[in-house]
Every structure is written in structure tokens, then in C-alpha cells.
Image (cartoon, grey):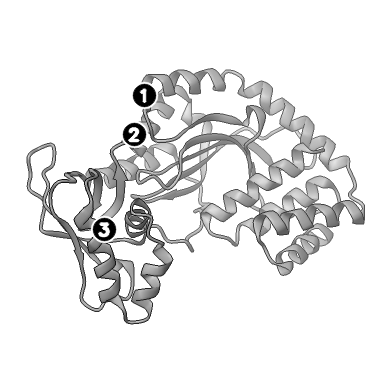
Amino acid sequence: MMNNFMYVNSKKDVFDNVVKKVSDIQASCKDYMLDGEKPVSVFAMNANQPEDVKLKFTAKTKQNEIVPSWFLMRDTSFNQLCTHFSIPSAYMKRCMDTDRSELMLQNMNSWLEQNTKDFLVRVNAGTVRGMLTTKYSAFDAPDMLDVVQDTLNTDSFDVVGQYVTDERLHIRLAEKQRMNIDGEDLFGGIQIDSSDVGLCSMRISYFVYKQVCTNGLCVSKGGGILFAQKHIGISKDAFREEFAAKLSTLDEYQEDIKSQIIRAKKEHLDDMTLEKILAKLKAEQKIGEAQNEKIIQLMNTRYDRSRFGLVNGITEVAQSYSLEKRIQLESFASKVLLAA
């Protein structure tokens, strides 16, 4: 299950190992189509958290297997079930936190009794990893990596970061050849994101990796997006075609990013400009003053007072956050770079 306090593993790896890990996870997962016309309920004994809640339903797999009588929920699937019925998940969790689990169960079961929607229930190891509507296209991590392997020469890349679970896929690939920028240990690459339970869209972005500090810079503007689509109506052939077309322009785009980095290294930031950018960072990304002070400290001690020094400071501080927040901060840093 997704742990919000797990960070990207920065140990180098090869792509085939990640593919095997993803395939092994997929092999233990099952899907069930929940018929909205059949009884569904939740129950628990002294539930204190979503993981204590059990979902009970009757359904069959495509192989005509009858499901067990119940599965434990997870935080992700519990939140999704609440969202389907427009029930604030924070309220339901508050009920459990204050020994009112019976009230939570009464609320949830009341809505489930009136339900007529069909659901795709995604299960692994006796737990519900996802509760999705029938609009969801199950184009899973193995499908995505299969296209990447067919289209990209993965032998030319190192896996410099990965977060692989049955809910979330995040891979950072860096080229083995360093970018030709004086005084920098930078490597271009791509960042792959997806979720088999609808936590994020499929997305492949241009990525810059700083080896010494393991800083990452996700470039999500202009040509930096190599592929992006929600899990709705996904075609494997269309994905392959679009990704291949974008890859053909990657060398040219990387040269543009290289020029941006060189310009940013030369641009000294005066106090007013720096304060303005950090104020925007604090407001948009909801980080504290202590983090801004840490960024300034890093600029003064490890990097410099240039625009690129600020970019490095932001991406280094981003490493202390959970995966999703880290990606947001790295994307913000890319906008700072591209403003050079």
C-alpha cells in the first residue's frame, strides 16, 4: 500500500529489474466487477482506521471465480468509496478516531444499499487496493513498461530512482552519458508515472538528474511532456505512436534545456527577485518558512546565488518530502529554471 513517508530509492538499478518487480506485483493482483444491483456492505469491529474496515460483496471474476466473502479496505480504496458517494472521507475517519465507528458504518451502508453503480474492485493480498468506476481503463504498469521497452533503448539509461507498489509507479531514468555543461554532473533522462488504482494519470516527462546530490528536476512545460493521459480509453498502439514521436524530438529539446541551464547559472539573483520567487514557492506549494531558509542556506553554502543555485536548493529540499510533494516541488523548480 502507498506509504506517504517513503521516498524515491536513489540506488542505481537496471530497467529489467524494475520490470520484473512490476510483473511480480501484477501476478498477485485480481480484479472483480461489482454488480451495482447486488448487495454490498462494509463492516468492522472497533474500527480505528480505514484498514480496519471490511468490504463485503458478491461477484465473479472473468474466470468465473466467486470472490471470498470480504476484503479489508485500504486508505486509498476507502477514500475512493467515500468519493463515489460524495461523503467526506475526513468525516468518516473522524468517526473512527472518536470511537464512533458504528456511525461511520451506518452512513456508508446506507449509501451502499442505494447504490446502483457498477465498480471495478482491484484486490491484492486480501485487501482492496482500488475502487474504480467502469470508466476506468485498466492499462496497468506492465502494459506501460512494455511500450517503454519497445520504444526506448533502456540499455542507454540507469534507473536512478524508483517507487514501485501495487498502487503507484514512479521511475527515474538517467542517460549514462553526462550533459556537456562545465562544472556540472547533470544527466538528461525521463520520468515515468502511473497508478493502477487511479491515483494519477499516465505521464512521461523529461527529467534532469544531478548525480552528486541525487537532485531531480521534472520538466513539465513545452516539449517536456512526452506522454500524458488519464486512464480512460487508452490505446496501446496510440500510446506507442505518440511516445515514439516525442522521443524523436528529445535530443533537440535537451539542447534547449542545456542552454536554459547555462543561462540560469550566469544569472545572479538579487535579494528582491529571490524573495519574490520564494514567496511564490511558499504560497503555491504550502511549505514553511524553515524550508525557504534551508533553500537559502544551501544556495549560500553548497551552490551559489544564481538562478540555477536556487533550482538546486529547491530540488534538494524536495528530497525530504513524500513522493507526490517532491514531484510538485521539482516541477516548480523547473518553472524557475525556464524563466531564465
Residues at marks 3 and 2, CA–CA distance in whole angstroms? 29 Å
Tell me the kind of residue under disc 3. Answer: Trp
Q: Is residue 52 visible?
A: no
**Do tag 3 and tag 1 residues touch (Cβ < 8 Å)?**
no
Q: Is residue 173 visible?
A: yes
Image location (x, y in percent) of residue 1: 35, 58
Residue matched to label 2:
139
Is 143 placed above or below 57 here?
A: above
* 71 lies left or right of 98: left
At 73% from the left edge and 51% from the top edge, which residue is drawn?
312
Which element is circle 1 on?
helix
Which element is circle 3 on?
helix
| Nearest to the observer: residue 327 or residue 312 | 327
* 177 lies left or right of 156: right
At 52% from the left edge and 54% from the top edge, which residue is drawn?
323
Residue matched to label 1:
236
Residue matched to label 3:
111
Question: How many numbered circles does the render carry?
Answer: 3
Image location (x, y in percent) of residue 109: 22, 63
Tell me the kind of residue under disc 1. Answer: Lys
